[in-house]
């Protein structure tokens, strides 16, 4: 039986048409083992080996919600004869999609390892519908409970300001591997609370280094929250601004 990793997204992930699709495509290409990418795509049919498109009529959020279970069944049929090692959920979408999909595959593929590849959340749901806004908090609370048990956050985004997902993970004691860009440099110190990388090879080497060395992972985890606590909680940015203004 073929061993496989699958990446599941809920938007047009390939080819690159946006910042989120750029992140997903780069992540898919850099994943080292046998892999398949699944996506919901309303624009056009994609004909490429190991990239599977589930065609929907529009990018409307409620259309996606209605199509979610058929989409998951479609994925299940495509992988039914394969041994699944990793199931990666792309985070550029509504949190509810991620949680429902996690429950589905936890039932049908319980031995797989699950990865939540976080980037931004689709706030369109909340802006348009009060009910969706409320149940989003239900899903997010459960996603956060899962985050606490993560070993590593892998964050390959090319552009960031001050990443909330990185800050959140560090505060929970989770080491971070992230791209070497300005916003990330303020939060991550190499070999202290994680690693910064410039190339995909460096990213994979850092991931292997932490994954294979339990003592290193524990040390990075113990240090993870220190930068957040010392720089953002003990002496908040608002207090620093107030002190600056008082000088004048």
Image (cartoon, rainbow, N blue to C red):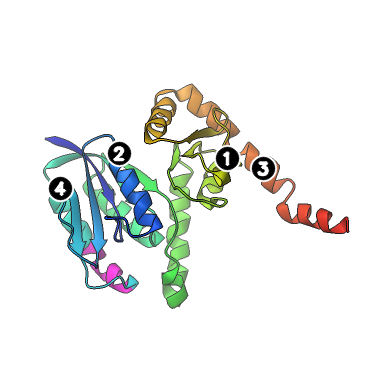
Q: Which residue is mark 3?
A: 229
| Magenta residue span | 62-70
Q: Which residue is mark 2?
A: 31
Rounded to the nearest angstrom, the CA distance separating label 1 from label 4 is: 37 Å
**Is residue 36 shown left or right of residue 17?**
left
Q: Which residue is mark 1?
A: 185
Give the mark toward the camera: 3 or 1.
1
Q: Which comes before the other along the chain, label 2 or label 4?
A: 2
Q: Quadrant of the N terminus?
A: top left
Disc 4, SS: loop
Give the mark toward the camera: 3 or 2.
2
**Is residue 220 shown left or right of residue 71?**
right
Q: Is residue 69 magenta?
A: yes
Residue 2's image quarter? top left
**Label 4 packing within 10 angstroms: few (<14), some (14-19), many (20+):** few
Q: Which residue is mark 4?
A: 49
Q: Which comes before the other along the chain, label 3 or label 2?
A: 2
Q: Which comes before the other along the chain, label 1 or label 4?
A: 4
Q: Which comes before the other along the chain, label 4 or label 3?
A: 4
Q: Residue at x 28, y 72 (%)?
A: 63
């Amino acid at each position: 039986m073929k061993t496989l990793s699958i990446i599941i997204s809920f938007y047009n992930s390939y080819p690159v048409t946006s910042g989120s699709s750029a992140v997903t495509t780069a992540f898919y290409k850099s994943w080292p083992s046998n892999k398949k990418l699944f996506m919901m795509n309303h624009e056009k049919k994609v004909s490429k080996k190991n990239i599977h498109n589930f065609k929907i009529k529009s990018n409307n959020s409620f259309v996606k919600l209605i199509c979610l279970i058929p989409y998951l069944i479609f994925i299940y049929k495509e992988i039914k004869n394969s041994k699944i090692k990793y199931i990666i959920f792309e985070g550029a979408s509504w949190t509810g999609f991620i949680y429902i999909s996690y429950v589905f595959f936890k039932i049908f593929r319980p031995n797989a390892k699950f990865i939540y590849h976080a980037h931004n959340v689709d706030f369109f749901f909340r802006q348009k519908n009060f009910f969706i806004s409320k149940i989003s908090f239900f899903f997010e609370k459960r996603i956060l409970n899962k985050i606490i048990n993560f070993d590593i956050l892998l964050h390959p985004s090319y552009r960031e300001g001050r990443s909330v997902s990185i800050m959140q993970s560090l505060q929970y004691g989770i080491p971070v591997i992230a791209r070497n860009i300005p916003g990330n440099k303020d939060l991550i110190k190499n070999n202290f609370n994680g690693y910064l990388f410039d190339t995909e090879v460096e990213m994979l080497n850092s991931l292997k280094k932490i994954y294979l060395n339990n003592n290193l992972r524990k040390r990075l985890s113990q240090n993870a929250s220190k930068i957040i606590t010392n720089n953002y909680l003990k002496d908040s940015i608002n207090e620093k601004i107030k002190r600056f203004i008082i000088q004048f």
